[in-house]
Image: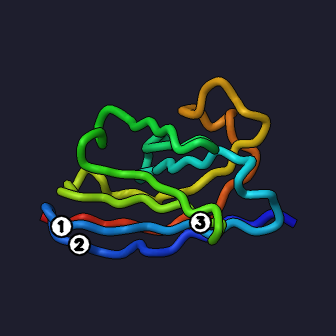
Amino acid sequence: QVQLVESGGGSVQAGGSLSLSCVASGLIFRNYAMGWFRQAPRKERGFVAAINWSGGSGFGDSVRGRFAISRDDAKNTVYLRMNNLRPGDTAVYYCGAAGGNPITLDGERDYDYWGQGTQVTVFS
């Protein structure tokens, strides 16, 4: 079965950096676009970043210029590098896999599979 496993979360002071990883199994990774979403307490899950099979990427407005997304198809892994973190970035971060070459990648409905999430806490 398909599994997505996130790692790399933790606590960091504002202005610091963290890198998240998501390892996928049970699917042909190179055929899937991959995305990161986040959910803060009492808020809906929101789009962070996505990368398609050819390496094209997109970002949510609140993270553009601070976060970077990349993928390594040989390792079935997608990464999220988060720089200049703010307390507002505190959330559980989820990775998702989207098959079928969807037109958009910024909505939860675009994704077929999800990981369990990893907590990121940014303190001031």
Who is closer to the viewer here, 13 or 74? Answer: 74
Residue behind mark 1: 16
Q: Is residue 20 left or right of residue 104?
A: left
The picture places residue 60, in percent across and down from the top left corner, at 38, 35
The picture places residue 52, in percent across and down from the top left corner, at 59, 41
User: Which quarter of the rendering shows the N terminus?
Assistant: bottom right
Say what amino acid the circle numbered 2 marks.
Val
Disc tally is 3
Report the mark closest to the observer, 3 or 1: 3
Which of the 4 quarters of the picture holds residue 18?
bottom left
The picture places residue 97, in percent across and down from the top left corner, at 68, 50
Above or below, comparing residue 98 to residue 23 in the picture: above
Mark 2 element type: strand
> How does the figure colour the protein chain or chains?
rainbow
Who is closer to the viewer here, 110 or 124? Answer: 110
Q: Residue at x 68, y 34 (%)?
A: 110
Who is closer to the viewer here, 68 or 54? Answer: 54
Q: Is residue 50 left or right of residue 108?
A: left
The picture places residue 89, in percent across and down from the top left corner, at 30, 53
Residue behind mark 3: 77
User: Which quarter of the rendering shows the C terminus?
Assistant: bottom left
User: In the image, which disc is placed on residue 12?
Assistant: 2
